[in-house]
Amino acid sequence: MATFLEGVGSVGVACTLAALVPAVALVLVARKARLTVALYYLVGVTLLTWARASGHWDVELSGAVMSLAPAAAVAGVFVLAYWAKAPASLAAIGSGLVAGALAGWLWRPCVGPKLGEILNSTDTEAARTLGLMLVYMAGALLPAVLLAVLPHALPAVRRFLDCMPVVVVGGAVGVAYAVTLATGRYDDLVGELYRMAADT
């Protein structure tokens, strides 16, 4: 429970926005498959964050190709999420999983003793730390998951989220995310978020 609560507490920390904002934007775009996209995003970001910490994934962004490939992936997952016809569709599952994995690849965690303990123990306690990472990320991404769940409980929320202006806002965030990656400005943005986190 403490791990989950630390994840929830990290929602207010600036550097967590690097993983949370794309999740929320993707949920806004995925009108017919919000919950699927949110849950698979959670799985993807957990796996790649854990894989980076444990040394199983050490690919770094460098050069034009490594900037353009993630940008193209972002554009692709937002289009797939928008066109997903059903919650169980490959488009919904794939867009959530790939977007989450990309966020986990790019995210630089910066908060909390529980997360630090998880990251420091990945090489010696693989299964345990992977489970704890999932619990932590469920807390950190709670706003996106709630945004995906609420329409199932409250029809008024569904009608609001189905409005085209809301979808356009999600798409605009996706475009900004892709452009930031394509122009090589993502690291600058994340660095600024870290500075904001350090100042709080």
Image (tube, rainbow, N blue to C red):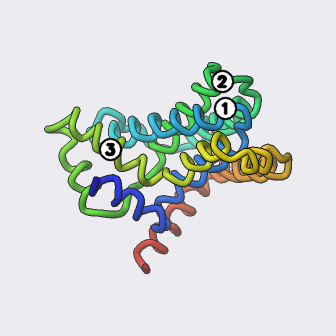
Residue under the point 38% across and 56% down: 7
The numbered mark, 3 or 1, whose residue comes first in the sequence reads 1
Q: What percent of the width, then of the height, locates residue 194?
A: 45, 67
Residue 101 to residue 145: above or below: above
Disc 2 vs disc 1: which is toward the camera?
Answer: 1
* Secondary structure state at the residue bearing disc 3: helix
The amino acid type found where label 1 is placed reads Ala
- Per the model, the C-alpha gap separating discs 3 and 1 is 24 Å
Disc 3 vs disc 1: which is toward the camera?
Answer: 1
* Secondary structure state at the residue bearing disc 2: helix
Nearest to the observer: residue 14 or residue 72: 14
Q: Which residue is mark 2?
A: 91
Residue 43 to residue 20: above or below: above
Residue under the point 37% across and 62% down: 110
Q: What percent of the width, then of the height, locates residue 28?
A: 70, 46
Q: Which residue is mark 1?
A: 33
Contact between labelled residues 1 and 2, with CB atoms less than 8 Å apart: yes
Which of the image's four quarters has the C terminus?
Answer: bottom left
The amino acid type found where label 3 is placed reads Met
Residue under the point 51% across and 51% down: 19
Q: What percent of the width, then of the height, locates residue 5?
A: 35, 59
Residue 185 is left or right of residue 112, and the answer is right
Nearest to the observer: residue 2 or residue 43: 2
* Secondary structure state at the residue bearing disc 1: loop
Q: Which residue is mark 3?
A: 133
For label 2, the crowd category at 10 Å Cα-Cα, with few meaning under 14, some 14 to 19 and many 20 or more, is many
